[in-house]
């Protein structure tokens, strides 16, 4: 089933699939009553009509290991976001897709606008098209009960590559997480890259410095400087569990 970009997704259906944050009855406090009628504490006074008032039930967030999720993994070049996203998607208990913005952007073979040669109108257009394509793919996966993790270098100080577009393309239930290791680690990882994905040290340092703007934003930030990929993926589950219990405001 296809959905127009920017419209709300229907909640997932079927056994074992959890709704996005804000869509489940639990998230609004409208819990279904158990069979047999309302539950009340023994000795509690009867309400009008002889019916005991229903005690409020604390909302129970979905389990991030089995829920249908949309995750946006943010970080500078060399943060390890693509490796972590691939590993996390490949080791979940439920179907999960990984969508890499760089992979989609490089679908353009002839006329590819590489921002390393200068950020211009054409490179901006291709980035915008890639993000919309990734968002469209994510929505289709989610509508069919498949979780999705997208990795992208989203800057906190540049609206054209900001979070607002991702929220429009994927939906309000998107869970952003920032991977931000130390600069030395990022430089070392970037040095092992090849092709147009390897940046100059100056560019890496500049991007890393701008990413520091995420501190104080309210988004969860993971410093994976001393963590391998499996450990970072496990920590990502812990972070997502907290995000589901208390969604960040962004």
Image (cartoon, rainbow, N blue to C red):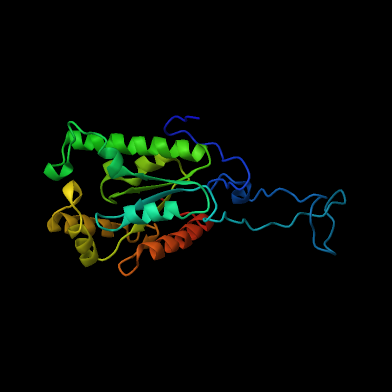
Q: Nearer the viewer, residue 33 or 28?
A: 33
Q: Nearer the viewer, residue 102 or 35?
A: 102
Is residue 239 shown above or below 199?
A: below
The picture places residue 27, in percent across and down from the top left corner, at 59, 50
The picture places residue 135, in percent across and down from the top left corner, at 39, 38
Residue at image coords 25%, 39%:
106
Residue at image coords 13%, 57%:
202
> Would residue 162 be visible to someone looking at this image?
yes
The image shows a total of numbered marks equal to 0
> Would residue 249 be visible to someone looking at this image?
no
The picture places residue 26, in percent across and down from the top left corner, at 62, 50
Residue at image coords 41%, 37%:
137
The picture places residue 129, in percent across and down from the top left corner, at 29, 34
| Quarter of the figure with residue 187 | bottom left
| Quarter of the figure with residue 107 | top left
Point out the residue furthest to the right here: 50
Left or right for 32, reference 35: left
């Amino acid at each position: 089933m296809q959905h127009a970009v920017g419209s709300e997704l229907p909640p997932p259906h079927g056994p074992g699939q959890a709704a996005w944050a804000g869509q489940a009855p639990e998230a609004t406090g409208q819990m279904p009553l158990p069979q047999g009628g309302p539950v009340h504490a023994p000795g509690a006074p009867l309400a009008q009509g002889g019916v005991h008032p229903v005690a409020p039930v604390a909302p129970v967030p979905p389990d991030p290991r089995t829920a249908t999720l949309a995750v946006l993994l943010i970080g500078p070049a060399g943060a390890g976001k693509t490796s972590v996203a691939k590993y996390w998607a490949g080791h979940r208990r439920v179907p999960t897709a990984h969508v890499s913005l760089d992979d989609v952007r490089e679908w353009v073979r002839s006329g590819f606008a590489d921002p390393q040669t200068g950020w211009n109108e054409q490179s901006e257009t291709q980035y915008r098209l890639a993000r919309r394509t990734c968002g469209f793919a994510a929505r289709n996966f989610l509508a069919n009960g498949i979780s999705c993790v997208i990795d992208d270098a989203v800057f906190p100080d540049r609206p054209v590559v900001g979070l607002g577009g991702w929220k429009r393309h994927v939906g309000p239930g998107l869970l952003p997480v920032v991977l931000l290791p130390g600069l030395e680690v990022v430089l070392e990882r970037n040095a092992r890259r090849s092709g147009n994905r390897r940046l100059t040290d100056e560019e890496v340092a500049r991007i890393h410095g701008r990413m520091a703007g995420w501190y104080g934003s309210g988004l969860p930030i993971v410093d994976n400087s001393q963590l391998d990929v499996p450990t970072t993926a496990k920590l990502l589950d812990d972070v997502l569990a907290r995000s589901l219990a208390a969604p960040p405001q962004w």
